[in-house]
Image: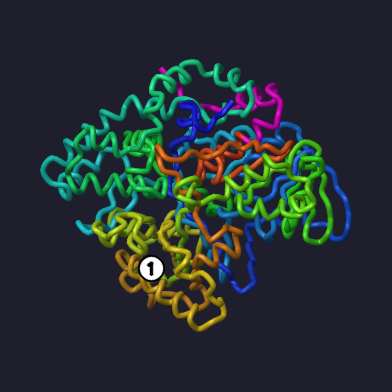
């Protein structure tokens, strides 16, 4: 069964990708993350051999989601993390009492009980999750003006009237009406039902109406959203730019490359009455901590400082991993790599050199790492970030319309690459407005970044200790401060010594093992599809944002769930589905 091209899987991709950007910023080697579990195991040094059922390489959200579900299903699972803190791209850290977020993520679908969000469903299965704080405003600073309207329909109509002028509200409301059937289909079939074997028909048929609604829309869910915009004759400049920006923040692509399924889900979710945004109390790291608890409570292991050097293969079958200290962990049932395909290919290098990797797997990994426009999938660009603690004297301590906790800044709609232009869009966050525990009294914590628009080749080959590199970082920081100053005009002067940290594409590459510091694959609707999670090699699986359904927290959680579903028996998968609570359907 080839899932990556089916209409069923295209909607299960959970067009739920809210903007998620991640970085781990170096803190001089002193990462005293007070929220990290201190009982996490360290790698056992020496040539020791351990045995388990499944080894998961990497503690990103996909790897952790997979591991937590496997542990719940009574599989012995061991998660191996190279760094000293778990969470991969979604980790957090502290410095001088400030809690820094990997990204100002817009989470939703967590504070409600019946939710289509796959990560929420995973929490329901493992019976562990963070405490959620709700809020309802998101700010924007556009060439047309600055506003922080509530998400939902209540205030956005006024925004359309003010900034879009004549015809804007009518065009947007007409589009929303046109998207209703697509939105129903996009929210219908849960990705938690997907498995990559013939038994998938059984789990799909558990949700017959959802399956019917999905199949009814068919290919339309896969098509570019720009085709709907053309069909509806969207001509208002503000509406077009707004939709293009939303597409970009969801998928890293403009409307011409974003699938209808993605926008159908998002428009229905964000513009429904009473909708709120959710934030995990304690920050994004609380999500990783909940998944750690889920792994460990069911007998799994999570090991930090455990750098995988090689995936072990014999007679074309993955059977374990070798760590950099020489120790070996054998896997009876599967090896799951949450590393990107470029790193995974390197981990298979020794086995390939020994002739243990067959031709089909070699071709598969070559395809996975082909970034050409013609035959492969190009990579999205990278990031620049600034993190800082600031003096909050005279600043609000709760978010409001005048002072939102999160905002987007758009410099110019008309640059050559549009929303994808380098250093044009910045996302800013002051999460201490939502959760005051994230910074000391009388202060706020700040983060700003460009969302996958920074070219890696601007930084490639630079010496990180050179004056040239330091000057380039300061130049990047200057641009990011400009975006922060839209709401905090004197932010630079408020910065607290020892808290300012600047991240670059080289930071991403170094600390996250992200090849070229990339956000993920640049998958354009109608042009490319992502692969599934099984590989031609027996017992070898890939999970994460280079596999279906792609980038973003809900999507990577879905990727991990699909991987776990494909490893466990149908009976165990069915029992997991018993525990999730999806929205009621008429």
Residues in magenta, as a range:
563-586
Q: Is residue 67 visible?
A: no
Q: Quadrant of the C terminus?
A: top left
Q: Element type at marker 1? A: helix
Q: Is residue 143 magenta?
A: no
Q: Is residue 583 magenta?
A: yes
Q: Could you say which quadrant of the image residue 16 lies in?
A: top left
Give the mark count: 1
Q: Is residue 155 visible?
A: yes
- 71 relative to 368 in the view: left or right: right
Q: x and y percent of residue 400 in the render?
A: 32, 54
Q: Which residue is depicted at the point 48% across and 81% down?
A: 468
Q: x and y percent of residue 187 in the render?
A: 43, 29
Compared to residue 460, the image places residue 262 above or below, namely: above
Q: Quadrant of the N terminus?
A: top right
Direction bottom: furthest residue: 467
Colour scheme used in the picture? rainbow
- In the foreground, 224 or 26: 224
Mark 1 closeness class: few <14, some 14–19, many ≥20 residues within 10 Å: many
Q: x and y percent of residue 415 in the render?
A: 27, 60
Q: Which residue is mark 1?
A: 480
- 244 relative to 494 in the view: left or right: left
- 559 relative to 447 in the view: left or right: right
- 403 relative to 345 in the view: left or right: left
Direction left: furthest residue: 166
Q: Which residue is depicted at the point 49% across and 27% down?
A: 6
Helix, strand or loop for the magenta stretch, by majority: helix
Compared to residue 345, the image places residue 502 above or below, namely: below
Q: x and y percent of residue 23 in the render?
A: 53, 60
- In the foreground, 68 or 329: 329
């Amino acid at each position: 069964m080839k899932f990556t091209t089916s209409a069923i899987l295209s909607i299960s991709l959970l067009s739920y990708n809210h903007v998620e950007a991640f970085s781990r910023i170096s803190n001089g080697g002193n990462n005293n993350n007070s929220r990290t579990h201190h009982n996490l195991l360290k790698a056992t040094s020496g040539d020791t051999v351990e045995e388990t059922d499944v080894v998961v390489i990497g503690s990103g959200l996909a790897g952790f989601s997979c591991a937590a579900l496997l542990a719940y299903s009574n599989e012995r699972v061991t998660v191996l993390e190279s760094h000293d803190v778990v969470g991969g791209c979604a980790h957090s850290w502290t410095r001088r009492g400030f809690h820094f977020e990997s990204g100002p993520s817009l989470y939703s679908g967590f504070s409600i009980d019946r939710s289509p969000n796959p990560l929420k469903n995973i929490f329901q299965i493992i019976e562990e999750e963070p405490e959620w704080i709700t809020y309802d405003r998101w700010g924007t600073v556009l060439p047309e003006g600055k506003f922080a309207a509530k998400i939902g329909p209540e205030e956005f109509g006024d925004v359309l009237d003010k900034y879009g002028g004549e015809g804007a509200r009518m065009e947007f409301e007409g589009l929303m009406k046109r998207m209703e059937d697509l939105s129903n289909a996009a929210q219908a079939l849960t990705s938690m039902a997907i498995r990559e074997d013939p038994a998938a028909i059984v789990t799909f048929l558990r949700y017959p109406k959802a399956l019917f609604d999905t199949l009814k829309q068919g290919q339309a869910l896969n098509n570019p959203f720009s085709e709907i915009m053309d069909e509806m004759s969207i001509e208002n400049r503000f509406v077009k730019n707004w939709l293009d920006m939303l597409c970009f923040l969801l998928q890293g692509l403009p409307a011409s490359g974003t699938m209808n399924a993605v926008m159908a889900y998002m428009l229905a979710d964000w513009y429904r009455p009473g909708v709120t945004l959710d934030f995990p109390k304690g920050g994004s790291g609380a999500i990783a901590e909940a998944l750690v608890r889920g792994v460990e409570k069911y007998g799994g292991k999570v090991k930090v400082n455990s750098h995988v050097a090689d995936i072990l293969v014999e007679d074309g079958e993955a059977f374990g991993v070798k760590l950099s200290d020489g120790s070996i962990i054998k896997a009876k049932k599967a090896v799951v790599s949450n590393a990107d395909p470029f790193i995974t290919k390197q981990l298979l290098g020794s086995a390939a050199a020994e002739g243990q990797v067959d031709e089909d797997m070699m071709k598969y990994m070559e395809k996975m790492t082909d970034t050409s426009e013609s035959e492969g999938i190009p990579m999205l660009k990278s990031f620049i970030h600034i993190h800082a603690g600031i003096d909050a004297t005279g600043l609000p301590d709760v978010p409001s319309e005048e002072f939102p906790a999160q905002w987007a800044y758009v410099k110019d709609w008309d640059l050559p690459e549009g929303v994808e232009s380098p250093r044009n869009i910045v996302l800013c966050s002051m999460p201490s407005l939502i959760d005051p525990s994230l910074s000391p009294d009388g202060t706020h914590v700040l983060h700003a970044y460009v969302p996958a628009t920074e070219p890696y080749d601007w930084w490639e080959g630079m010496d990180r200790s050179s004056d040239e590199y330091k000057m380039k970082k300061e130049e990047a920081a200057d641009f990011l401060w400009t975006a922060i100053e839209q709401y905090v005009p004197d932010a630079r002067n408020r910065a607290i010594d020892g808290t300012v940290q600047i991240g670059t594409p080289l930071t991403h590459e170094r600390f996250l093992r992200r090849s070229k510091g990339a956000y993920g694959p640049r998958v354009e609707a109608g042009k490319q599809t992502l692969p599934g999670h099984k590989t031609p090699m027996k017992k070898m699986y890939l999970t994460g944002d280079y596999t279906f359904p792609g980038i973003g927290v809900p999507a990577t959680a879905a990727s991990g769930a699909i991987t776990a579903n494909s490893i466990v028996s149908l009976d165990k998968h069915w029992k997991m589905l018993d525990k999730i609570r999806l929205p009621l359907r008429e």
